[in-house]
Amino acid sequence: KAGVTQTPRYLIKTRGQQVTLSCSPISGHRSVSWYQQTPGQGLQFLFEYFSETQRNKGNFPGRFSGRQFSNSRSEMNVSTLELGDSALYLCASSRTADGYTFGSGTRLTVV
Amino acid sequence: EDQVTQSPEALRLQEGESSSLNCSYTVSGLRGLFWYRQDPGKGPEFLFTLYSAGEEKEKERLKATLTKKESFLHITAPKPEDSATYLCAVVGYGGSQGNLIFGKGTKLSVKP
């Protein structure tokens, strides 16, 4: 069965630009969560969406936002990019709290 | 505040040399504890979910156990292909379903 698909895989942006990342969950999974992974901080929770509603949000500035569509696909947006936003952005989908399947991530580099 | 601490940060083993990785957690009501394996440049790959103290799960050379304060990932007779970063995460009843709290991981290297 198809896994979690994240696009694009790699992205290079300039400081001050904005970026949109996409995540298609496993069919039937209504929960989509986003995480930022950096060497120093590890995996940090950004936000979670369920049935098009944001259920929880991590401790990140308002430049980080997201949304979920009726087909459960989700996007996250980062505005006014900073060098420190360079990271691997991962999304995970789940149907219940029993298991979370991650995508391969989007590697964002801000120059 | 929910928290996960993994030790050691890095572990180097010879092929066949068994060992254990530790995950200590603090959570307000454990909904589930998860172990993942992550290879460089890839997303975490699900290994196990544990729900209550005393629970154990096995998969090939890996065995995960859970107590009220920590979890162990035992690796028996590891092979070079077991080299990866192993991540531990918890979900508490205080947070939402998708809010996994991760430890920093243990980077395992297995030499032939």
Image (cartoon, coloured by chain):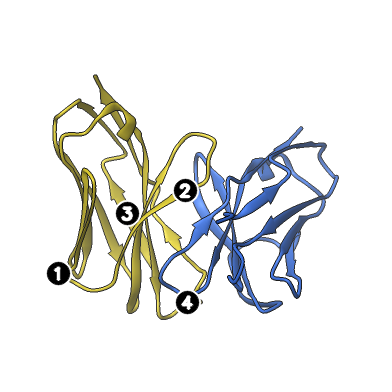
Q: Which residue is mark 4?
A: B95
Chain letter behind tag 4: B
Look at the numbered disc 4 and give the secondary structure of its residue. loop
Residue at left 51%, top 77%?
B96
| Dot label at residue B44 | 2
Marks 3/1: CA distance? 20 Å
Question: What letter labels the chain drawn in yellow?
Answer: B
Marks 2/1: CA distance? 25 Å
Q: Nearer the viewer, residue B3 or A55?
A: A55
Residue type for callout 4: Gly
Question: What letter labels the chain drawn in blue?
Answer: A
Chain letter behind tag 2: B
Say few, some or many: other residues with alpha carbon within 10 Å of mark 1 (under 14 / 14 to 19 / 20 or more): few
Residue B4 horizontal/vertical position (percent): 35, 59
Look at the numbered disc 2 and give the secondary structure of its residue. loop
Kindly indicate whether the residue at mark 4 contacts the one at mark 1 (C-beta within 8 angstroms).
no
Residue type for callout 2: Pro
Residue type for callout 3: Thr
